[in-house]
Image (cartoon, rainbow, N blue to C red):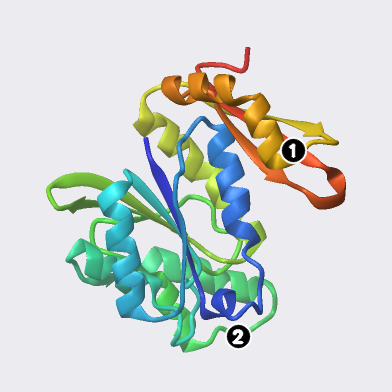
Amino acid sequence: MQVEIVAIGTELLLGQIVDTNSSWIGAELAAAGLNSHYQTKVGDNPARIKEALEIALRRSDAVICCGGLGPTQDDVTRQVLADVMGVELEFRPELADKIRLMFTSRGREMSDNNLSQAMVPVGGSALAEQPGTAPGLACPVTFEGVERILYAVPGVPYEMKEMVLGSIIPDLRRRAGEESVIASRVLRTWGQSESGLAEILADRIDELDSIGNPTLAFLASGVEGLKVRITAKATDES
């Protein structure tokens, strides 16, 4: 099971917000034993988002889109998902009622544009968790003859995390059909350059490369010295 993360938002590209969501999702995927080899950031442009999703669907079984589910004109993720699926958006009254209740329970009046958050691609479904006004989405799609799954979650971290842990990770593990875990251990070294340590470990690195699991990587960390990360995937942590 290959899972890709696509973070959506021009503010990410401009450096106005640091994309901590993708790193958090990546860590949760690893803890669940799910492979994730690519992460992409794309601005709030429908054509470029569509292109990013199509690239992701060609190489991954599942794609998690993060961001672009708000009620404003630059929140285009729902429409792009529908375009990729080749379907229309449909209004879900039950979602509108839920959003409206969130406003009334807080003594606030709902704007009409919030009703756009009750639109779901035909064939898609809303995730069970909805801590904010934006429902998360799960959208099965047949892309170039292959069955894939698209998920969409809000960019608000606490909303995203509840949906990923509550619905997406369990669904991905079910789809993967196997229990596994990806674990990493970091060893800190001092007194050797990266090239020098690579030379010392050359035979071991060649052996691991030929096997493919576990993997070994060097992480230069400045005053913290040189770190060596070992990552392995297995059915359990033992």
Circle 2 SS class: loop
Q: Which residue is mark 1?
A: 227
Q: Is residue 116 above or below residue 225?
A: below
The residue identified by callout 2 is 109
Q: Which of the two discs, 1 and 2, sits closer to the camera? A: 1
The three-letter code of the residue at mark 2 reads Glu
Residue 59 or 179: which is nearer the viewer? Answer: 59
Residue drawn at 85 percent across, 36 percent down? 191
At x 54%, y 32%, the residue is 32
Question: Quick check: can you spot residue 91?
Answer: no
Front one among 84 and 131? 84
Residue type at mark 1: give it: Lys
Q: Are marks 1 and 2 in contact (CB under 8 Å)?
A: no
- Left or right of residue 1, residue 162 in this image: right
Residue at the (54%, 52%) spot, across then down: 129
Total tally of numbered discs in the picture: 2
Q: Is residue 151 visible?
A: yes
